[in-house]
Image: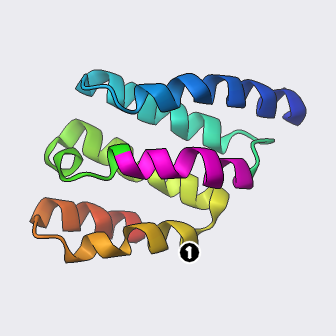
Amino acid sequence: MDSNYANYYTKEVMGVLIREFSTADEEMKKIVLKVVKQCVATDGVEAEYVKKEVLPEFNRHFWVRRMALERRNYQQLVETTVEIANKVGGATIVGKVVDELKDESEPFRKMTMETVE
């Protein structure tokens, strides 16, 4: 697909995905993470768009302690975050998650370390 079309359609889909970030359904969260990973990895999607539009909501809804306790979503969150880091730059992601290393929850700190590695 042409990169201009990919950028347009990703922006259209991302609106729905961002809305679904707040869903309580764990299976839906897993699917949303997988689709976000695919959208971010697509050629033509701009890093600036991901950084401004997707990343704040992504961090707010997914980087919570509960995600570290659920094994199914845990790995998908790490993979998606790494893919976002590939797009926007590792320093941006590390800057966002580094404070989580001070959290009380051991599984949450472990998930953060896997992401940083």
Q: Nearer the viewer, residue 99 or 33?
A: 99
Residue 80 visible to the viewer: no
**Scheme of image coloration:** rainbow
Q: Which residue is mark 1?
A: 91
Q: Secondary structure at mark 1?
A: helix
Q: What residue is drawn where x is 32% and y is 25%?
A: 23
The answer to which quarter of the image holds residue 48 is bottom right
Amino acid, disc 1: Ala
> Could you say where residue 49 lies in the image, as x and y percent from the top left?
70, 48
Q: Nearer the viewer, residue 66 or 114?
A: 66
Q: What residue is drawn where x is 85% and y is 26%?
A: 5
Q: Main secondary structure of the magenta part?
A: helix
Query: Range of the magenta residues?
Result: 47-60
Up-down relation of residue 76 to residue 25 (above or below): below
> Could you say where residue 59 lies in the image, as x and y percent from the top left?
41, 52
Up-down relation of residue 91 to residue 31 (above or below): below
Q: Is residue 24 left or right of residue 10?
A: left
Q: Is residue 43 left or right of residue 114?
A: right
